[in-house]
Image (cartoon, rainbow, N blue to C red):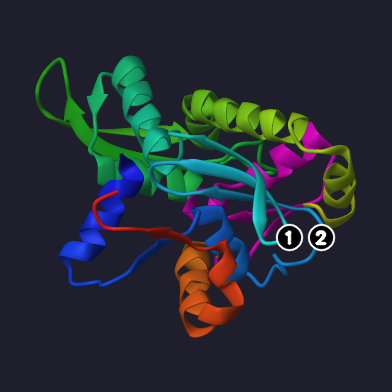
Amino acid sequence: MERRAVAESAENAGAREVYLINEPMAAAIGVGIPVEKPRGNMIIDIGGGTSEIAVIALSGIVNNTSIRIAGDEMNESIIAYLKKKYNLLIGEQTAEFVKTEIGSAFPLSEELKIDIKGRDLVEGLPKTITVSSAEIREALEEPVSAIMQAIHDALEETPPELAADIVDRGIVMTGGGSLLRNLDKKIRQETGLPVFVVEEPLTCVVNGTGKIISQFTRYAKILQREKKGT
C-alpha cells in the first residue's frame, strides 16, 4: 500500500513511468559503494521516520530490516522524559535542538549541559531547566536499543559469505540519525565491527537518486517499476 501511494503521488504529478528503489540502495549508491559487485556491504540509514539496515550485493538487497524508530522517535522520547521527570512540556523543534546539541548514544569524554525552556505542566507558566547529556542519553535509551536490536537481527540473517565481507569492510552509516554523538561507537562496541559515518549523511539518498537518473541504463536492473492500475 505504501509503495502504491508513492507511485500514485508521482503519477499525479505528471510522471508517465514510475520506478521505485529501496532507500538503503539509493544511499549506498550515493556514497559510492559498488553495489554491482559480489562483495557484501552493510548500510544503516537512520532517517526521520524509519531506520533501514540492509546488506547489499550484486545489485540487490540480500536482507533488509526496517523499523519505524528513528530521529522522530528519539525526539518523542526526549519530550516524554522531560515531561515525566521535570513536568516540563517542550515542542518537537526544542527536542530536536536538544538531541543535536547534547544527545548521545554512548558516554562522552566530557558530559555536556544545556538550558531548556518550556512550560511547567503544574503551574502552567514558562520555565527553564538545565539538563545534562547523561540525562538525554537516558531518555534516548529505548529508541537506541531498538535500533541496536534491529542491527543484531540483520547481522544474524546475513549469509556467512557476506558476513565475512562485512567483517572486512565494516558498516556504513547514513541519514541524519547517524549524526547522534557516539552512535557509531556504540554499534562498534556491541558488534565488534568497523563502523563509518559518511561525510554528508543527510544527502546520501538524494545523491544516489540523482546518480541513478543520470546513469539510468547502468542501474535499471535494480529499479522496481510500478505499473498504473496495479
Q: Quadrant of residue 81?
A: top left
Amino acid type of the residue tagged 1 in the rendering: Leu
Amino acid type of the residue tagged 2 in the rendering: Pro
Residue 182 visible in the displayed image: no
Q: Quadrant of residue 98?
A: top left
Q: What residue would you read off at disc 2?
A: 38
Question: Which residue is at a point 60% across and 37% down the rendered structure image?
Answer: 105
In the image, residue 70 sits, relative to residue 179, either above or below, namely: above
Residue 96 pos. (x, y %) = 36, 46
Question: Which residue is at a point 17% across and 68% down the rendered structure image?
Answer: 13
Instruction: Estimate the spatial distance between the alpha carbons at disc 2 and disc 1, rounded to whole Å.
Output: 5 Å
Residue 158 on the magenta segment: no
Q: What secondary structure is marked by label 2?
A: loop
In the image, residue 102 sits, relative to residue 83, either above or below, namely: below
Residue 34 pos. (x, y %) = 72, 69
**Pointer 2 and pointer 1: residues touching (CB < 8 Å)?**
yes
Q: What residue would you read off at disc 1?
A: 58
- The quadrant in which the N terminus is found is top left
Residue 198 on the magenta segment: yes
**Is residue 12 toward the left or the right of residue 16 in the image?**
left
Q: How packed is label 2: few (under 14 Cα within 10 Å), some, or many (20 or more)?
A: some
**Is residue 32 toward the left or the right of residue 228 in the image?**
right
**Which residue range is magenta in the image?**
171-200
